[in-house]
Image: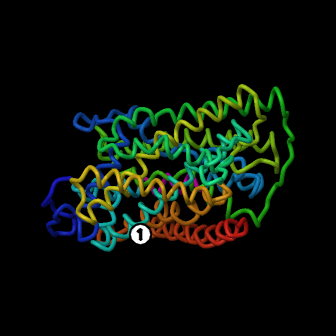
């Protein structure tokens, strides 16, 4: 982002940064942009932007969709459609905030434009915490699914302590991704990350294969489970969390006026995939479906191995992209940006901490529900709505629009309070 541009409020901004997050924000933003292929000089076409945005939205949340339906019942799918519509609308609000000032290029910049330094710090803080917890969920996912592929595996350590099952594979997954966290330029991983779409398609195909050849369809299930709705809503929000990279994708477009069309296309495509996986998984396994539907697939089957392997590729390639902004923030905070050895040490420390926490988190679904209920709701509901209201209040907003935004904020508050409380109780109850 260029320095000394007008910030949209009549003042001159020095790179939209303040103490604590000035250099940090800029370095972290550049690392986040490494998730996109380096085509920004020419601008991205409509089709390529659709691919990038779909990659940003589509993720490991698809694994928990059948579990989300089992917690809330079939009627909770209506709330899934509502969440998708809300996240699409708040995504368009981010686009409008971007249009308010040409110097805005990242999500923290939007917070800066709306609420000054405090807004930038708040948005950046929630971004870092969400990235850290999603990195942990990636390791939990790796451990659970590798344990499914290789049940009973264990290694005896020199001190006589045995490392078995999920914990063993979490440590191994951490060892595999560790060298990628030392890289300064992570752009090379962006192309591999596109395999996430292939992984989603492979998962859906495996569920169809399982339903036809092995398990059949149970065809029942709960119609509505009010007690489980908070968990379901939190998981539904995880499916559409990608707002943190929307400004970067918007800035990369050749024709930014078509951002809402790109967002609509990606939202519909992801919704169809999510919904189909949810219905198929719940029909096959009913209330016995696990927090990751791949864990329900029978061991030893070819389609099970294909689904798990393809599901594992995406987290392994994206882990470094997730922790890079965190590493850069720590480097800048302690003025260690030019030290290669310091970067290696900090990256290693961050990874070790995520491995340790992941080894203690027993259930993937509860962690994902917490991320969705608290952090994702902040990024997808509160920040876009509040920033939009504050940026455009002087220009005047229609009562209908304000009423719609207030309704969305109330929904977000409900999900944040009830979902966070329920997921934390579930997590605590497992220890």
Q: Residues within 10 Å of mark 1 (few under 14, many from 20)?
A: some
Q: Position of residue 36 (x, y in %)?
A: 36, 40
**Residue at the spot x=81%, y=28% of the render?**
212
Is 71 located above or below residue 51 in the figure? below
| Quarter of the image where one finds residue 279 | top right
Examine the residues drawn in magenta and state their main secondary structure.
helix
Q: Position of residue 166 (x, y in %)?
A: 66, 48
**213 displayed left or right of 188:** right
The quadrant of the rendering that contains the C terminus is bottom right
Q: Position of residue 336 (x, y in %)?
A: 24, 59
**Residue at the spot x=76%, y=67% of the render?**
227
**324 displayed left or right of 229:** left
Q: Nearer the viewer, residue 215 or 318?
A: 318
Q: Nearer the viewer, residue 391 or 276?
A: 276
Secondary element under disc 1, as helix, strand or loop, is helix
Say whether residue 379 is magenta: no
**109 displayed left or right of 313:** left
Q: Is residue 102 visible?
A: no
Residue bearing mark 1: 386
Residue bounds of the magenta highlight:
83-91
Q: Is residue 139 visible?
A: yes
Q: Position of residue 417 (x, y in %)?
A: 60, 73
């Amino acid at each position: 982002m260029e320095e000394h541009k007008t910030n949209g409020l009549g003042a001159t901004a020095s790179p939209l940064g303040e103490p604590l997050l000035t250099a940090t924000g800029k370095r972290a933003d550049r690392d986040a942009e490494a998730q996109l292929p380096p085509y920004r000089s020419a601008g991205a076409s409509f089709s390529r932007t659709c691919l990038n945005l779909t990659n940003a939205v589509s993720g490991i949340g698809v694994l928990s969709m059948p579990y989300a339906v089992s917690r809330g019942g079939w009627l909770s799918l209506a709330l899934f459609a509502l969440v998708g519509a809300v996240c699409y609308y708040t995504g368009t609000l981010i686009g409008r905030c971007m249009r308010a000032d040409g110097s805005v290029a990242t999500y923290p910049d939007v917070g800066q434009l709306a609420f000054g330094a405090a807004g930038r710090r708040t948005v950046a803080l929630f971004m870092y915490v969400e990235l850290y917890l999603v990195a942990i969920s990636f390791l939990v996912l790796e451990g659970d699914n590798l344990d499914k592929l290789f049940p009973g595996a264990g290694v005896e350590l020199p001190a006589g302590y045995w490392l078995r099952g999920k914990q063993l594979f979490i440590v191994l997954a951490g060892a595999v991704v560790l060298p990628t966290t030392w890289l300064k330029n992570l752009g090379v991983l962006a192309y591999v990350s596109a395999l996430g779409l292939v992984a989603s398609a492979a998962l859906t195909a495996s569920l169809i294969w399982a339903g036809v050849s092995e398990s059949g369809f149970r065809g029942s299930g709960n119609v509505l489970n009010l007690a489980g709705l908070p968990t379901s809503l939190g998981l539904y929000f995880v499916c559409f969390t990608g707002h943190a990279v929307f400004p970067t994708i918007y800035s990369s477009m050749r024709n930014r006026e078509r951002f809402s069309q790109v967002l609509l296309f990606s939202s519909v495509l992801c919704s169809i995939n999510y919904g189909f996986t949810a219905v198929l998984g719940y029909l096959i396994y009913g209330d016995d479906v696990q927090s990751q539907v791949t864990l329900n697939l029978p061991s030893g089957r070819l389609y099970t191995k294909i689904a798990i392997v393809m599901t594992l590729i995406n987290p392994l390639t994206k882990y470094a992209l997730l922790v890079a902004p965190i590493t850069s923030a720590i480097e800048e905070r302690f003025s260690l940006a030019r030290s290669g050895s310091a970067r290696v040490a900090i990256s290693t420390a961050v990874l070790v901490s995520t491995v340790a926490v992941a080894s203690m988190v027993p259930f993937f679904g509860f962690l994902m529900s917490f991320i969705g209920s608290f952090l994702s709701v902040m990024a997808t509901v509160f920040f876009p709505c509040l920033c939009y209201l504050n940026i455009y209040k002087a220009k005047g907003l229609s009562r209908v629009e304000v009423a719609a935004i207030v309704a969305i904020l109330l929904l977000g508050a409900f999900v944040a309070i009830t979902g966070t409380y329920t997921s934390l109780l579930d997590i605590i109850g497992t220890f």
